[in-house]
Every structure is written in structure tokens, then in C-alpha cells.
Amino acid sequence: MEEQQVKKTYVVTGATSGIGLAVMEQLLDRGANVIGVGRSPDRCSGQLERLSEAYPRARLAYVLADLALQPGVRKAARQIAETLAAWQVEALDGLVNNAGTFAYWQTLTAEGFDTQWAVNHLAPFLLTHELLPLLERSPDARVITVSSASHYGTKLRWEDIQLLERYNPLRAYKQTKLANVLFTAELNRRLGDQSRVRAVAADPGLVNTGIGEKAGSRFARWIWLLRRRGGIPAERSAAGIVDLLSDPALPNSPHVYWKHGKPKRPNPYALDQDHGWRLWEISARMTGTG
């Protein structure tokens, strides 16, 4: 399986720490070309220097982008395309939509979107759209969007999908993770059975990362610090994602939701075709891709 990664090219968002960084390292271990996306200039430059020293023969790059803003997403896509052209690589073999955020207090982006909705759902939706022509040039491309078990037991509040009127931080997060699975299933439906691009949603499990420490609330940070103690290392979650990128049987699998490299039944709501179509149309309007 490892040999299948050689000379393949992948993009990983949220790639300066946690799961994203672990995915980067494991792909580099397998000989892949990798482009990481991050929002911190210092972290991007620091990880680029460290990884370049560890993998001196690798084709490796970082793209700086604030995925909360749609111009930032589009700029990242252009820079990714420019990097592939500089490497003389014609196709993108995989996109890992890993970047995510959690906000205890509701904050709006400069474009007026709820930040969790913008980063966790609209950014993967838009980045996938922008990179799809490059993905379609690959004989076997994968779009992996990192969801969460938080998507179970929830529904989208269609009349207030961003919870702008009645914000609840946990519900907002759960809705974005549900949207990840709905988006994945609908993307596969729209691409069709003959497409060489296959999308899946990955459940990383409870992972010992710092996502909850950026919540903006001391109480929320305290709860996360207690909860993360029971989490698994980011490397284990990353291994499941890398397996999804390389499993030759994946294109023939009907499953859209996976945990640690194995299929798992998602929230049935996420498989409803009407819900998937409705969310797609809303997302397309919000991103100007409709």
C-alpha cells in the first residue's frame, strides 16, 4: 500500500499542528509530494523548515491562507495550482479538508458568516470546488473531509442555518460536522459513478489536540483540557486518513463515513438526498459557486 503513495501529490489543510501535521508527516514518509495549508506565517515557515530537513528529497510546500475568508480560500487554490505547475505536476491526487475551529462566543467573519460555519463547512466546500479540475486529472483522486462523531443526534436548523439568531456553540459545531458528511455524500452523487474522484468523511475520534483551547472561553478551555486527556494521539487519527487516501478498494465502496480506516454508519440524516441537495444549493449561493 505504501508504494501507491510514491509520486502522488496531496493537499492538507490545517497542516501546522495536530492531525493535519501528522498526515503531512505520514504522507512524506510514504514518498508523496505534499502541500500544507496554514494560517500562521510563523508556524508555516517553522514546519516547512523542520520537514524540509527531515525529508530533504521531498517536494514539500506550505500555502498561507485564512480559510475563514473566501478570498483566502480562492487565493490558496491558485497558489496550490501554481505550486503544482512549478513542480511540473499535472494532477492532484488528494485533498484533506482537515482545518477546523470551535468558538464558544459567536464571531462573524468580515463577510458576515459565522466563523465556525465559514471555516468548518464553507471552506472545504469552496476549496474542493476550486481544486476539482486538478483532482479530475488524477486517475484515482480522493477528497477526505474530517468530520466528527459530534454530527450524530443533530439536524440542520434550516431557517437559521448559521445560528445567527440563537447561537449555541456546541450546536453550531455539531451542525458543521453534519454538513461535512452531507457535503461528502452529495459531492459523490453529483460527480456520479464514473468519476475518478471519490469523497469520504473521516471521523478522527476523540483526539488529544488543542482545538478546544482556542474557544475564547476559560470555562470551555477548562472542559476541553479535561476531555482531551482521554483522547488518542493525532498520529493514530492521521493513519486512518492516510489509509483512506491509499486504499485501492475505496472507489468501489458505498460507504461515505469512515473511522480509523473502517466504514461506519453515519447519522441517517446525513444520507438524505433532499437534505444534501438543499445544503449544496445554500452553500453554492453563499460561496458564489452556484
Image (tube, rainbow, N blue to C red):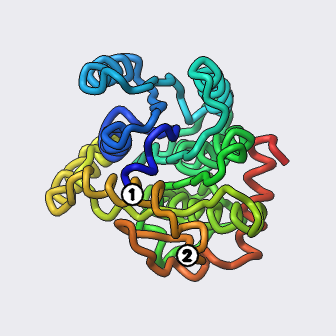
Question: Residue 122, relative to residue 174: is it above or below?
Answer: above
For marks 1 and 2 on the same chain, the one whose residue lies earlier in the sequence = 1
Q: Nearer the viewer, mark 1 or mark 2?
A: 1
Is residue 245 toward the left or the right of residue 70 in the image?
left
Q: Which residue is mark 2?
A: 255
View extreme (front): residue: 3
The answer for how far apart the CA atoms under marks 1 and 2 are is 20 Å
Residue sitting at x 63%, y 32%: 73
Confirm or deny contact between disc 1 and disc 2 (CB under 8 A): no
Residue flagged by tag 2: what amino acid is it? His
User: Can see residue 105?
Assistant: no
Residue sitting at x 65%, y 46%: 138
Quarter occupied by residue 57: top left
Question: Residue 288, relative to residue 148: is it above or below?
Answer: above
The residue closer to the viewer here, 254 or 164, is 254
The residue closer to the viewer here, 109 or 52, is 52
Question: Residue 64, relative to residue 1: is it above or below?
Answer: above
Is residue 238 toward the left or the right of residue 226 in the image?
right
Q: Position of residue 87 (x, y in %)?
A: 57, 22
The residue closer to the viewer here, 155 or 177, is 177
Classify mark 2: residues with Cα within 10 Å, few (<14), some (14-19) or many (20+).
some
Quarter occupied by residue 182: bottom right
Q: Position of residue 155 (x, y in %)?
A: 58, 73
Q: Which residue is mark 1?
A: 1
Residue sitting at x 60%, y 17%: 86
Q: Position of residue 142 (x, y in %)?
A: 57, 54
